[in-house]
Image (cartoon, rainbow, N blue to C red):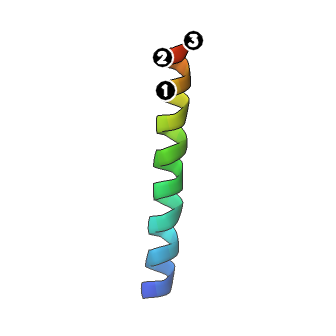
Amino acid sequence: MSVIAEKGYHATTMEDIAAKSLQVEDIEM
């Protein structure tokens, strides 16, 4: 269970980073 939870956590973190990157690009444009 912990392994699955960790993978889910990492996936969410990557999505958050991608979302923040997109927001920064929108602000720059």
Q: Secondary structure at mark 1?
A: helix
Q: In the rendered image, is residue 1 in sight?
A: no
Does residue 27 lie above or below 8 as drawn? above
Residue, disc 1? 24
Q: Secondary structure at mark 2?
A: helix
Asked whether the beta carbons under mark 1 and mark 3 sit within 8 Å of each other, the answer is no
Amino acid type of the residue that numbered disc 2 sits on in the rendered structure: Ile
- Distance between the alpha carbons at the discs numbered 2 and 1: 5 Å
- Disc marking residue 6: none
Asked whether the beta carbons under mark 3 and mark 2 sit within 8 Å of each other, the answer is yes
Task: Tell me the quarter of the picture where residue 22 sits.
Answer: top right
Check disc 1: other Cα within 10 Å, few if <14, some if 14-19, many if 20+.
few
Q: In the rendered image, is residue 4 in sight?
A: yes
Instruction: Looking at this view, name the residue that lies furthest to the top.
Output: 29
Does residue 16 lie above or below 25 as drawn? below
Kindly identify the residue that appears in the image at 48 percent across and 27 percent down.
23
Residue, disc 2? 27
Where does the C terminus fall, quadrant-wise?
top right
Amino acid type of the residue that numbered disc 3 sits on in the rendered structure: Met
The mark total stands at 3
Q: Secondary structure at mark 3?
A: loop
Check disc 3: other Cα within 10 Å, few if <14, some if 14-19, many if 20+.
few
- Distance between the alpha carbons at the discs numbered 1 and 3: 9 Å
Task: Tell me the quarter of the picture where residue 5 sits.
Answer: bottom left
Does residue 6 lie above or below 27 as drawn? below
Label whose residue precedes the other's in the sequence (1 or 3): 1
Asked whether the beta carbons under mark 2 and mark 1 sit within 8 Å of each other, the answer is yes
Residue, disc 3? 29
Front residue of this view, candidates 4 and 16: 16
